[in-house]
Image (tube, rainbow, N blue to C red):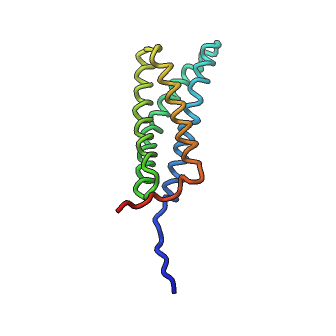
Amino acid sequence: MTTEIRQRRPRISLFCFRAVAVVTALFAIGQPIFIGSYFSGTFEALGLHSAGAAALQALGLLLPIAAGAVVAMRGRWWFLIWSVALFFLIHVQAILGYTRVLQLHVPVGVLTVGIAVALALASLRRGAGNPREVRR
């Protein structure tokens, strides 16, 4: 009779992290679209851009929490590191936007969108659910 030790794997926590990461990426992608619409003359789009910033800040808070659950279930530790980095970037981005420091708001926005999309894509990869190796 063989005894198989069951490994802890991030299943539910990874599903939650993936959901939050994908929604965050979609909202991040929407931000330049909304502000582009505003610059094209649809003045109501500025309100959507502002509301999107508020939603991104809320999602930015949920993302490290979900990543922490993945790490607790022996998932990839770098999900947490990049989620915390994205959390700070989103909040810096919002501050720069509300204070109208556009010469920094735009490049930090590009970086924020890039990291959000990369994190979402990385979470959807097949190997994202493999447990970490245990170091002895």
Where in the figure is residue 122, as x and y percent of width and height?
A: 55, 44
Q: Residue at x 45, y 17 (%)?
A: 104
Q: Is residue 80 above or below residue 88?
A: below
Front-most of 48 and 28?
A: 28
Where in the figure is residue 30, as x and y percent of width and height?
A: 59, 29
Q: Is residue 1 above or below residue 13?
A: below
Q: Residue at x 51, y 51 (%)?
A: 16
Q: Residue at x 59, y 30 (%)?
A: 29
Q: Residue at x 44, y 48 (%)?
A: 67
Seen from this angle, which residue lies furthest bottom? 1
Where in the figure is residue 98, as x and y percent of width and height?
A: 43, 19
Q: Is residue 61 above or below residue 30?
A: below
* On-image quarter of the C terminus: bottom left
Seen from this angle, which residue lies furthest front? 136
Front-most of 52 and 11?
A: 11
Where in the figure is residue 38, as x and y percent of width and height?
A: 60, 16
